[in-house]
Amino acid sequence: MDVSMDVSMDVSMDVSMDVSMDVSVDVSMDVSVDVSVDVSVDVSVDVSVDVSVDVFCPKYEKELFKYIIKASKLKK
């Protein structure tokens, strides 16, 4: 009895893994600031001058006081 077994097993595994990541971030900021200042100044000046001159003369005031007393006595 001649048994001949030829077992030939060829296992070939070719694993090729190509990972390519291209990350491109483009950030563009356009900052535009428009400053407009409107200054409106309304100046209105009202000048009001009240001049009152009180002349104080003690001599005449005493005489006036006498006349006021006399007049009040006459009314009574």
Image (tube, rainbow, N blue to C red):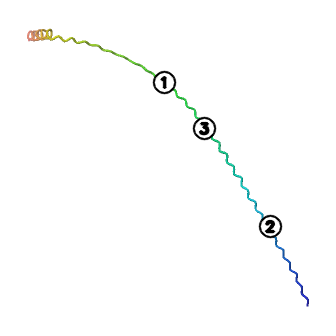
State the separation of the CA atoms marked 3 and 1: 28 Å
Q: Position of residue 39 (x, y in %)?
A: 49, 26
Q: In this view, does 50 lie to the left or right of 5?
A: left
Most foreground residue, 3 or 21:
21
Q: Position of residue 21 (x, y in %)?
A: 71, 55
State the separation of the CA atoms marked 1 and 2: 82 Å
Image point (34%, 16%), residue name: 48
Kindly indicate the quadrant of the structure image that contains residue 17: bottom right
Amino acid found under the numbered disc labelled 3: Val
Amino acid found under the numbered disc labelled 2: Asp
Task: Farthest residue to the bottom: give it.
Answer: 1
What residue would you read off at disc 1?
40
- Nearest to viewer (mark 1 / mark 2): 2
Q: Which of marks 1 and 2 is nearer the N terminus?
A: 2
- Element type at mark 2: loop
Amino acid found under the numbered disc labelled 1: Ser
Q: In this view, does 3 lie above or below 46?
A: below
What residue would you read off at disc 3?
31
Task: State the mark number for residue 14.
Answer: 2
Q: Is residue 72 above or below residue 41?
A: above
Q: Is residue 42 above or below residue 51?
A: below
Most foreground residue, 52 or 18:
18
Q: In this view, does 21 lie to the left or right of 37?
A: right
> Which quadrant would the C terminus be assigned to in this image?
top left
Image point (55%, 29%), residue name: 36
Q: Do the residues labelled 2 and 3 touch (CB within 8 Å)?
A: no
Kindly indicate the quadrant of the structure image that contains residue 16: bottom right
